[in-house]
Structure formats: C-alpha cells, structure tokens
Image: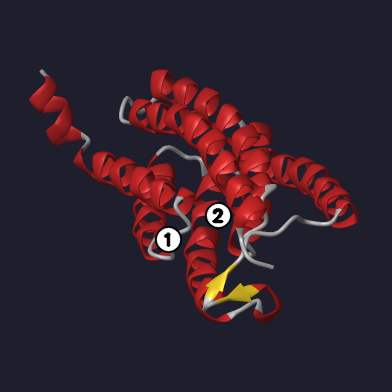
C-alpha cells in the first residue's frame, strides 16, 4: 500500500523533498536555497494546477522569478549591507511593513473575488491570501529581512488547512504538502531564531 502511494505520488514527493531542502538552506543563509527553490516552484506549479488551486499556481510562477532574483541579490545586490561578500540580515522598516500589510489585505480580497467570480477555483479567499502573503514574504526573503519569517509562519498555518481540505476533497497527494507546511511551521520559528542571532552577531 505504501509503495503504491509512493508510485502514485512520486511527483509530489520530489516537490516536498526539494521544498524542505530549500528552507533548511535558507535557515543557514545558504544562497543555494534559491536554485533548489526554483526546482520546488516548478514542480509545485504543476501539482496545484492539477488541484484547481489557480492562485497557488500564480504564486509558484512568481516563486520561480523571485528565486532567480533572490539568487542574484544575495550574491551581488545590497551593497550597503554586504560584509566580506555576504549579504547581512536586516530589519524592515515599520512604515514599509504596514504598507505591505495593507496591500496584502486588499489584493487578497480582490484576487479571491476574481477567482471566485470568473473561474472554477476552490477556496478562493484562503488560496488568494496565501498567494498574496507569500508574494510579500518571498520578496522580503530575497531582501533578507528578518520579519519575512513572521509572514511565512502565518502563510504556513493557512496553507496546512488548505491542503488538508483539498486532500480530502480531490487529491490525496496534497496530504504530503499539508505535512510539508506543518514542518514549515517549525522551520519558520527556527529560521527566525537563526536569523535573529545572525543579526545580533554579524559585523556592521
């Protein structure tokens, strides 16, 4: 039975494995998290399209672009925050954080309404929230802002619920992704603590 499940869901398994590796590398501030993230995003785009989670598909298309950008930015960008060739962790400003929160709320409602009105997408508002909030979190990650982990934690909570519901509804393979995001919850805490320690100890 277990072998049949592995064979039937091998694509999802590869996605889960690459997703875990990506976050583990991110916690360690290893730039290789971005090319691994590219692999994860491509696989997950296919998986969520099969499950009619179209906002999630849009999100993972964005991940492909942002992983490429983050790979460049961590290696070459942020000249004012570089030390010995390494991009340092930084805090995001409160003003910018509040603006991003407002954009997230408005865009989530608009995208949820649009998908609900014009497509056969499921769970449109929850799916749209995780999409928009992840847009923000991924941009913050590429910029290496500590607070990206706060946003990832919230996204992970909603995403676990979303994938469990869809797993029962239509695609048992999504239970693997629900488990992945449950693990991500713990990794978000670990990532925050690791980056906070890095922020305290890094050279100015």
Residue 80, placed above or below residue 150:
below
The image quadrant that residue 36 belongs to is bottom left
Tell me the residue that label 2 is attached to.
58
Residue 51 appears at what percent x and percent y? 42, 37
Return the residue nearer the eye: 153 or 28. 28
**Is residue 69 rendered to the left or right of residue 204?**
left
- Quadrant the C terminus occupies: bottom right
Q: Measuring 60% from the left and 29% from the top, which residue is drawn there?
A: 158
**Is residue 28 rendered to the left or right of residue 2?**
right
Residue 168, placed above or below residue 42:
above
Q: Which mark is residue 105?
A: none
Q: Earlier in the sequence, mark 2 or mark 1?
A: 1
Residue 124 appears at what percent x and percent y? 64, 35
From the viewer's perspective, is the residue at label 2 or at label 1 nearer? 1
Residue 81 appears at what percent x and percent y? 67, 73
Tell me the residue that label 1 is attached to.
30
Of helix, strand and loop, which one carries label 2?
A: helix
Q: Measuring 54% from the left and 81% from the top, which residue is drawn there?
A: 76
Residue 92 appears at what percent x and percent y? 77, 56
Of helix, strand and loop, which one carries label 1?
A: loop
Q: Is residue 135 visible?
A: no
């Amino acid at each position: 039975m277990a072998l049949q499940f592995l064979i039937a869901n091998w694509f999802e398994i590869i996605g889960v494995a690459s997703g875990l590796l990506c976050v583990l590398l991110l916690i360690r501030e290893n730039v290789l998290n971005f090319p691994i993230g590219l692999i994860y995003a491509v696989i997950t785009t296919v998986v969520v399209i099969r499950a009619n989670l179209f906002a999630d598909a849009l999100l993972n298309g964005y991940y492909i672009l942002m992983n490429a950008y983050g790979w460049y930015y961590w290696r070459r960008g942020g000249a004012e925050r570089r030390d010995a060739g390494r991009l340092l962790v930084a805090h995001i400003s409160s003003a910018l954080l509040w603006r991003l929160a407002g954009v997230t709320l408005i865009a989530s409602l608009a995208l949820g309404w649009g998908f609900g009105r014009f497509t056969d997408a499921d769970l449109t508002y929850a799916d749209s929230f995780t999409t928009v909030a992840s847009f923000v979190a991924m941009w913050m990650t590429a910029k290496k802002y500590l607070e990206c982990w706060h946003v990832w934690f919230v996204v992970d909570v909603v995403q676990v619920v979303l994938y469990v519901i869809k797993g029962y509804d239509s695609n048992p393979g999504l239970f693997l992704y629900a488990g992945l995001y449950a693990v991500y919850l713990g990794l978000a805490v670990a990532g925050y603590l690791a980056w906070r320690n890095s922020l305290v100890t890094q050279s100015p």
